[in-house]
Amino acid sequence: VINRVSDYVPRYVVGKLGTNKVNFFRDMDELRMVSTVFIGFGIVDDHRGDHGDVLARTQTLFTHCTEILAKYDGMLRQFVLDDKGCVLIACFGVHGHTHVDDASRAVGFAQDVQNSVHYTKTQIGVTSGRLFCGCVGSTIRREFAVVGDSCNMAARLMAIANSGIRVDESTYMHTNDVFDFEDG
């Protein structure tokens, strides 16, 4: 079973699968410095009723973004397509994806997506801060989550990005020697 799910579960969680601990996954809970990227895509459904085309465009977008994410060694937290649109959430700094330059990796990922996904509008928010990283849910259904104010702020910055990238002050302070930013 572990081999079948390993492509769909964060690396750190895969390492914990199959353990017989009473506190199943509770030892994974921690506070970490994480850079979070929220990307909203302005595609996907043009409401013409051709759901096969929507699925194909979404799959192309997903594949393209995950290839870019792998280059920066970030973790795909979520990719959602619903009635509100399509959103990708990526994290840098969670266990198994930690580097001294996580904020730079997050901004680099955001720029690469914005520069290479020409077939749809992108709105991107990037933040860096201390977040809870761990399992949430019951013993029947759990998921690995990244939760906190910084994560919420990334979603808000995405919402006001208007076809651009917005970063918080912490990300700016960690990356302004690597990237050029405009006021705004």
Image: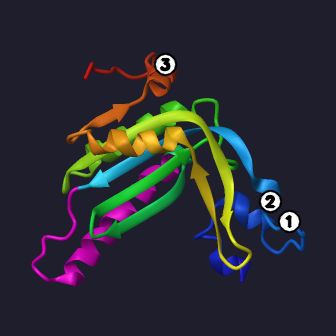
* Residue 45 left/right relative to 116: left
Question: Residue 26 has which mark?
Answer: 2
* Residue 14 left/right relative to 86: right
Q: Which residue is mark 3?
A: 173
Pick the residue in front: 29 or 108.
29
Asked whether residue 83 is in view, the answer is yes
Give the class, few, some or many, for how many residues have Cα within 10 Å of label 1's Cα (few <14, many ≥20). Answer: few
Tell me which numbered mark, 2 or 3, is placed earlier along the sequence: 2
Whether residue 52 is situated above or below residue 63 in the rendered picture: below
Q: Give x and y (percent) for residue 149.
A: 52, 39
Please give the range of residues in magenta: 42-71
Q: Give x and y (percent) for residue 33.
A: 63, 35
Mark 2 vs mark 3, foreground winner is 2
Q: CA distance from mark 2 to mark 3?
A: 33 Å
1 and 2 marks in contact (CB < 8 Å): yes
Give the class, few, some or many, for how many residues have Cα within 10 Å of label 3's Cα (few <14, many ≥20). Answer: few
2 and 3 marks in contact (CB < 8 Å): no
Give the class, few, some or many, for how many residues have Cα within 10 Å of label 2's Cα (few <14, many ≥20). Answer: few
Pick the residue in front: 63 or 146.
146
Asked whether residue 109 is in view, the answer is no
The amino acid beneath tag 1 is Asn
Mark 1 vs mark 3, foreground winner is 1
Q: Which residue is mark 1?
A: 23
Which secondary structure, mark 2?
helix
Q: Residue at x 31, y 36 (%)?
A: 165
Q: Main secondary structure of the magenta part?
A: helix
Whether residue 97 is situated above or below residue 175 in the rendered picture: below
Q: Is residue 66 magenta?
A: yes
